[in-house]
Image (spheres, grey):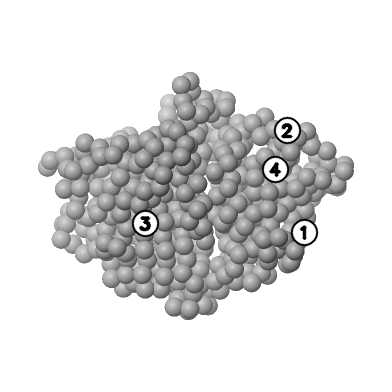
Amino acid sequence: AGRALAAEPVSGAAAVFSGYPFTLGVASGDPSADGFVLWTRLAPKPMEGGGMKEESVWVDWQVAEDEGMSRIVASGREAAHADWAHSVHVEVANLKPDRWYWYQFKAGGEASPKARTRTLASPDQAADQTSTLRMAFASCQHWEAGHYTAYEHMLRENPDVVIHLGDYIYEGRGREGQLRRHVGDEPMDLVSYRNRHAQYKTDPALQAMHQAAPWIVTWDDHEVENNYAGPIPEEKAHSTPEAFLRRRAAAYQAYYEHMPLRAACVPKGPDMKLYRTVRHGRLVDFHVLDTRQYRTDQPYGGERAFPGPEVMNPDGTLLGKTQREWLYSQMKTSPATWNVLAQQVMMARVDRAAGPDVACAMDQWPAYEVERRAVLRAFQELKVSNPVVITGDIHTHWANDLLTDFDNLESRTVASELVCSSISSKGDGEAKPKFQDSMLRENPFVKYFSDRRGYVSCTIGPKIWRTDFRTVDYVSRPGAPLVTPVSYILESGRAGLQNA
Ligand SMILES: [Fe+2]
């Protein structure tokens, strides 16, 4: 992207690969009204650093209006460089709004799969004139924990856009006795993070879903390390801040190299700006957040705890000041009917302890209580139109109403939160965990909870937002049928979940 080339990239017959170069498939992302990003990476040997020579290679791309790719409307070539793992990120512009397109890459006589993506509606399109958007969201796809059956079902639904809320990879070393095994040790450097991303990208169900719709992605912790907070690693004793930031730089670069992200997201050392807004007409704004890179350390060692004085630390933050002010300004000026916060950790203050004690998860918003309350207050004070929080991270489905004051269960509902379970992490799960009844009884703003794997489908219209929770009963073997245990409606102008 915009850098001087040491030597002219090779193309055509001069680019001879040690095997088929498109083993990781193709992807598209961050759709706008006039374009999107197209992604691929040349990697004939995906788990061995990619298997490419040092030289740069020309990659040709084409975008067509039809599935047969006879009406080409955009085309070009992009150089794939070794220092970006021979990945390419093409920002296509000047296309028509709100329609499907097809695309393909070619390099050295080899062709990628043909894939489908789309533009979104023009930002000046009135909400009631904007097409209904079908959005599916997912998170947490631990390779070793299960099959990606959920993506096979998502594919059959034909969503317009997919949002991934993080834990796209997991960093643990390969272990014995798992369903599928991570290749290699825990990644610490660029080459090992690349190999881990490449291994995940070889999954056929994941590739197929990437090839069927544009994705909007953000990360959680496992793209770097479990429960890291800004510059602070999980195990402080085992790493210096300098060493951890070197590791974070490698992890962020590998993430960028494997995701359909725009040039605005190109990492700079240990920093990478991932927060952004994606807009579909005046119907919906997706404010995509990053609650890992700028956060302060988890209070009380990050474990479940009584919410004592540390959670009221006024300097405690998940967003950091710059991102928080950006979010407020985006929400305040948004022309959209629905304002979605697409983010990682649960915002509802769920009491996890049975009985009169209160215990909260210290990796989530209730551990950063001052900022959590400020965001909920901002929904009211800035008169944010229909805020909806979508969340990943915790490998369970939840449907929550968000109250102004969780100590007063009679207080007003200001927004709703939809939490997707994992694609595979934590394995099959239980039909009904023991704590479920008492948890639902003590937290009446929680409308639904499930320990099964799955994803969430949303149908977003100008008056009604419909949510279907999707589950599969097992991921330990392939082929689980799709279940839709519950569906909810959100009505524009009326806060709170309603039964569908
Ligand atoms: Fe996870």
Residue 388's x, y, as percent?
A: 36, 61
Earlier in the chain: of badge 3 and badge 1, it is: 1
Q: Which residue is mark 1?
A: 76
- 283 relative to 199, above or below: below
- Amino acid type assigned to the residue bearing label 1 in the image: Gly
Q: In what element is the residue under mark 2?
A: loop
Q: Which residue is mark 4?
A: 22
Q: Is residue 499 left or right of residue 37?
A: left
How far apart are the two marked residues, 3 and 4, measured between alpha carbons? Answer: 34 Å
Earlier in the chain: of badge 4 and badge 1, it is: 4
Earlier in the chain: of badge 2 and badge 4, it is: 4
Residue 367 in sight: no
Earlier in the chain: of badge 3 and badge 4, it is: 4
Q: In what element is the residue under mark 4?
A: loop
- Amino acid type assigned to the residue bearing label 2 in the image: Gly
Query: For the point 58% across and 48% down, which residue is it?
Result: 208
Q: In what element is the residue under mark 1?
A: strand
Q: Is residue 247 left or right of residue 495?
A: right
